Each structure stands twice: as C-alpha cells, then as structure tokens.
Amino acid sequence: MHGKCLCGSIQVTAPDQDEISVCHCTMCRRWGGAPMFAVHCGPEVQFSGSATPSTYRSSEWAERGFCPSCGTHLYFHYLPQDDYVLAAGLFQDPEDFRITGQIFIDDKPSYYALANETETLTGEQVIAQFGGASSS
C-alpha cells in the first residue's frame, strides 16, 4: 500500500491490508479530534520523501508520528514490538478498506456511532492483550 501526508512531504509504503480498526481511547480522540481509523501494518513500514516524521512519545511504550510540515497524523508505533498502526486516511484507495473492529469501546462518547457491526474490545481487554500497558 502507498500513502502520503497532506502536503506530500512524507510518503509511506506498507504491506497490503484491507481491515481497519477504530480506536476510541481518550488519547486518540484528543490527538486527532476523533477516533483513529487505524490500519495495523506491523514492522514492515517504510517512510520516504523530503521530510522525516516527527514523533511524540505518548507513553512509556508508544509514540505517535506526524508530518512536521503539515501536521498530518501518520502513525501509532507500539515500541516493544516495533509495530506500526497507520492512519487509514493516508492511503489512496480507501474504498478497499472495511471496518472490522473497535477498541476502547468503553471510552467512546455517546455523540457518535458507527453504522456497521464489528468486534469490540474494552480498554481493559486491549491492555491485557498488550501486557499491561495503559493508553491514558
């Protein structure tokens, strides 16, 4: 898959994926003003272009990347496993994606809802999967 930030200074190449998870955690909503529509890509992600992603260390175990020129949110990087979760909006063919899951469903505010049914996990369930790390 190929994508880019708003200004085009950063391009991203990642393995083909067709599933999106939606993260409703407080950090993702604060970071982007909405839930993160996320594509899990693992460690095989390459960035290129005229700029290098800037990072913000949002916890002991994760960082978030963004374009230093236009501010586009690029990724959530789970450091212990070198695991990248990229913003779905970076990619040119979004119609190929389908939403298959929602995490931190217990943090989701009541003012929005997704139309399709998906698998859901609470914050506690997500943290248990990641070995006790916290999102907020």
Image (tube, grey):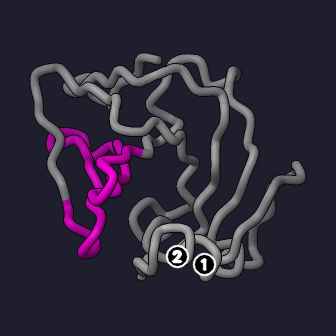
**Residue linked to disc 1:** 123
Q: In the figure, 104 relative to 86: above or below?
A: below
Judged left or right of residue 37, residue 84 is left
Q: Position of residue 85 (x, y in %)?
A: 44, 45
Q: Quadrant of residue 103?
A: bottom right
Residue 58 drawn at (x, y percent)? 27, 70
Give left or right: position of 119 versus 126: right
Three-letter residue code for mark 1: Gly
Decide which of 62, 25 is in the foreground and name it. Answer: 62
Q: Any magenta on residue 66?
A: yes
In contact (CB < 8 Å): disc 2 and disc 1: yes
Q: Quadrant of residue 136?
A: bottom left
Give the number of callouts. 2
Location of residue 49 in the rendering, given as x and y in whole percent from the top left corner? 16, 20
The magenta-colored residue range is 56-84
Quadrant for residue 98, please give it.
top right
Residue at 55% over, 61% down: 34
Give yes or no for residue 53 being in the magenta stretch.
no
Seen at 15% across and 48% down, the residue is: 54
Residue 45 vertical placement versus 58 (above, below): above
Q: Position of residue 100 (x, y in %)?
A: 75, 45
At horizontal 44% and vertical 59% (from top left) the residue drawn is: 32
Determine whether 71 is above or below 80 in the image: above
Say which mark, if any, is on residue 85: none
- Residue pointed to by mark 2: 127
Crowd around label 2: few <14 · some 14–19 · many ≥20 (10 Å):
some
Residue at 53% x, 37% y is 88
Work out how far the residue at label 2 is from the one at label 1, CA to CA, in angstroms: 6 Å
Q: Amino acid at mark 2?
A: Ile
User: Residue extending furthest front?
Assistant: 131
Tag 2 secondary structure: helix
